[in-house]
Image (spheres, rainbow, N blue to C red):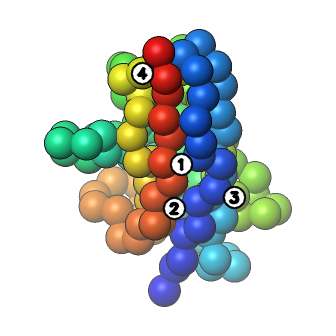
Amino acid sequence: QVQLVESGGGLVQAGGSLSLSCVVSRRTLPRYTTMGWFRQAPGKEREFVASIFWSAGRTVYADSVKGRFTISRDNAKNTVHLQMNSLKPEDTAVYYCAFRGSLVGDYDYWGQGTQVTVSS
């Protein structure tokens, strides 16, 4: 069982920055662990934002956030971060952290979500 606890959401003006964090409760992470960030805006489907392969540190981003968002991990604290810069009103959504114990496939565990609101 894995628990994910997100923090760091809030309200920011367009052009501003926010940083999200997600702590993974599992002490030892599988070698092929992937951590991801997703978001869901009102009336829209949940969409992929970014992911990181835990061991190698390789990252993947959605085109809509490339160059503005950065995903990173802190191995010692089992924490994944999402630094969001140059925020736009269309980034407004509930952001979810997700875990899977493999490089591909469905994510197995999800956090409770944290609200990010960007005002124009």
Which residue is tagged 3?
79
Distance CA(mark 2)–CA(mark 1): 6 Å
**Circle 1 — which element?**
strand
Residue 89 disc label: 4
Q: Which residue is mark 1?
A: 53
Q: In the structure shown, which secondary structural element does the residue marked by tag 4 occupy?
A: helix
Q: Earlier in the sequence, mark 4 or mark 3?
A: 3
Mark 2, other Cα within 10 Å: few <14 / some 14–19 / many ≥20: some
The amino acid sitting under disc 3 is Thr
**Badges 1 and 4: C-beta atoms under 8 Å apart?**
no
Residue for badge 2: 33
Mark toward the start of the polypeptide (2 vs 1):
2
Frontmost of labels 3 and 1 is: 3
In the picture, residue 84 is in which quadrant? top right
Residue 87 lies, in percent from the top left, at: 53, 20
Left or right side of 68 for 102: left
- The numbered disc on residue 111 is none
Q: CA distance from mark 1 to mark 4?
A: 29 Å
Mark 2: amino acid: Thr
Q: Give percent across and percent down for residue 96.
A: 44, 54
**Mark 3 near mark 2, Cβ–Cβ under 8 Å?**
no
Residue 38 x, y percent position in the rendering: 39, 46
User: Callout 3: helix, strand or loop?
Assistant: strand
Badge 2 vs badge 1, beta-carbon distance below 8 Å:
yes
Task: Report whether residue 41 is seen.
Answer: yes
Mark 3–mark 1 distance (CA, rounded to whole Å): 13 Å
Task: Rate crowding at label 4 as few (under 14), some (14 to 19) or many (20 or more) other CA atoms within 10 Å.
Answer: some
Whether the residues at callouts 3 and 1 have beta carbons within 8 Å, the answer is no
Query: Alpha-carbon distance for marks 4 and 2?
Result: 32 Å
Earlier-in-chain disc, 4 versus 2: 2
| In this view, the mark in front (4 or 2) | 4
